[in-house]
Image (cartoon, helix red, strand yellow):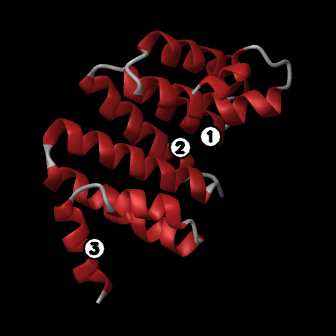
């Protein structure tokens, strides 16, 4: 995570908007909500100003991990809705994955299954094996379901 912190101070818009979502996710997973919020706030300066579906979708997804449960679900759903308006298939796929992982932690496997299965199928079609395996390994229940569907 240390190597991502530079995005908080870089003057290069393109770099910061690509790295800040990863920094916020890493910080949220590392139980550093202040850093995650700081990265999300920094990202919002550009995404909210642009008003573009891609930026607004990534912004919503970036804020979800540090939001309360009700708001987080709304943010993930909003992110998917906005990102589906774009051609940014990897961003849509990543959102399915993060939403599925969040659902699994909050509500259990059944609710997460659809999101993780979708992420696995999309990542596989994109040829991104590492992300596909992460989605597939979300839980043994999802893995068994995905394997059955693949046959």
Q: Residues within 10 Å of mark 1 (few under 14, many from 20)?
A: some
53 relative to 98 in the view: left or right: right
Residue 87 falls in which quadrant of the image?
bottom right
Q: Secondary structure at mark 1?
A: helix
Task: Identify the residue shown where x is 35% and y is 20%.
Answer: 67
Question: What label sits on residue 146 in the rendered view?
Answer: 3
- Residue indicated by mark 1: 53
Judge whether 112 appears above or below 39 on screen.
below
Q: Residues within 10 Å of mark 2 (few under 14, many from 20)?
A: some
Q: Earlier in the sequence, mark 1 or mark 3?
A: 1
Task: Identify the residue shown where x is 41% and y is 24%.
Answer: 30
Q: Secondary structure at mark 2?
A: helix
Task: Identify the residue shown where x is 40% and y is 32%.
Answer: 75
Judge whether 55 appears above or below 135 on screen.
above
Question: What label sits on residue 82 in the rendered view?
Answer: 2
Q: Residues within 10 Å of mark 3 (few under 14, many from 20)?
A: some
Residue 42 falls in which quadrant of the image?
top right
Task: Identify the residue shown where x is 16% and y is 63%.
Answer: 141
Q: Earlier in the sequence, mark 3 or mark 2?
A: 2
Q: CA distance from mark 1 to mark 2?
A: 5 Å
Q: Foreground mark, 1 or 3?
A: 3
Which image quarter holds the C terminus? bottom left
Q: Are the residues at dot 1 and dot 3 in contact (C-beta closer than 8 Å)?
A: no
Q: Are the residues at dot 1 and dot 2 in contact (C-beta closer than 8 Å)?
A: yes
Q: CA distance from mark 1 to mark 3?
A: 30 Å
Q: Nearer the viewer, residue 39 or 79?
A: 39
Given the current orientation, which residue lies at the most extreme front position?
Answer: 2
Judge whether 94 appears above or below 14 on screen.
below
Q: Foreground mark, 3 or 2?
A: 3
């Amino acid at each position: 995570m240390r190597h991502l912190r530079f995005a908080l101070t870089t003057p290069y818009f393109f770099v910061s908007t690509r790295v800040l979502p990863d920094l916020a996710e890493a910080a949220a997973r590392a139980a550093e909500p202040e850093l995650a919020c700081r990265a999300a706030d920094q990202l919002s300066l550009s995404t909210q100003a642009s008003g573009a579906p891609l930026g607004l979708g990534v912004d919503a997804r970036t804020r979800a991990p540090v939001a309360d449960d009700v708001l987080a679900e709304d943010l993930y759903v909003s992110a998917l809705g906005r990102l589906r308006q774009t051609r940014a298939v990897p961003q849509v796929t990543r959102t399915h994955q993060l939403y599925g992982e969040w659902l699994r932690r909050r509500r259990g496997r059944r609710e997460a299954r659809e999101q993780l299965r979708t992420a696995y199928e999309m990542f596989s079609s994109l040829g991104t094996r590492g992300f596909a395996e992460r989605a597939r390994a979300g839980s043994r229940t999802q893995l068994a379901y995905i394997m059955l569907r693949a046959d």
